[in-house]
Amino acid sequence: MTEENFSETIEALSKVLELVFLVEKDFSGVRLRSASILLHDELRKQVETVIKVIEDDIKQVEAGIQPLKKYFLMRKNALNALNNLTSSLKQMIDESTSVSEIQESVRLFSLAAEEDFVLTILQLEKLWNKEIMEIMESLKKVISIMQVTHEKIIRYKRECNIQEGLGSDLGALLNELLEGKLEKFKTGEKELRSRLLPET
């Protein structure tokens, strides 16, 4: 690269920076498909804000793993209580020979199983209202972000011509700058820009 090409190379680098920033903010969730104000500080702050919100939701989900485990363990306990109640009732039907025997079995087994079920139901409701609802909201956001991100990955693979061998049109632009092929760079940059910003 010769010194007379320096200003042209700096201009080319600025164009690459603009495209990279477009992908960065789009990937972070800030939706803007125009190059005119890409490098404004306000947009940088929007990107940082979106990243912070995502981090907060992920922390909420991570902190919620234990309450979620507890919730499903309690649900299992409720099912066990119902199973115990079912078993005791069936056993009474099949094996009891008198009313007093049925009453004794109800007192010893059936009522205890029913009380376990009711207690667990009340505990599940408290846990839901206290912790699980918030975790579910964060999970919904995180899942939505994951779905949108996957859609963007598919789009970037197409728009940036991303290949399994780590090649991409963005990498090709950097290689053309490295090799001083500015004319080839200009053509490639225009083509990539037209895919990333179809209205410009």
Image: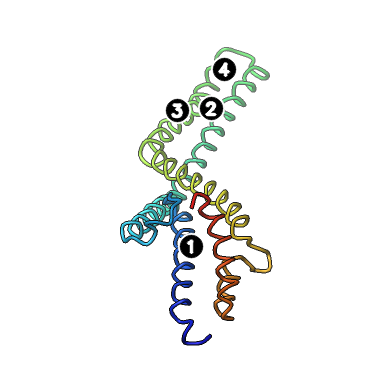
The CA distance from mark 2 to mark 3 is 15 Å
Task: Give the residue type at disc 4.
Answer: Ile
The residue labelled by disc 3 is 118
Choose the circle earlier in sequence order: 1 or 3.
1
Q: Secondary structure at mark 1?
A: helix
Residue at 55 percent of width and 75 percent of height: 182
The CA distance from mark 4 to mark 1 is 79 Å
The residue labelled by disc 2 is 109
Q: Residues within 10 Å of mark 3 (few under 14, many from 20)?
A: some
The quarter holding residue 130 reads: top left
Task: Give the residue type at disc 2.
Answer: Phe
Q: Is residue 180 above or below residue 66?
A: below
Q: Secondary structure at mark 2?
A: helix
Q: Is residue 11 above or below residue 75?
A: below
Choose the circle earlier in sequence order: 2 or 3.
2
Which label is found at residue 154? none
Q: Position of residue 151 (x, y in %)?
A: 57, 48
The CA distance from mark 3 to mark 4 is 22 Å
Q: Position of residue 58 (x, y in %)?
A: 43, 53
The residue labelled by disc 4 is 102
Which label is found at residue 19? 1
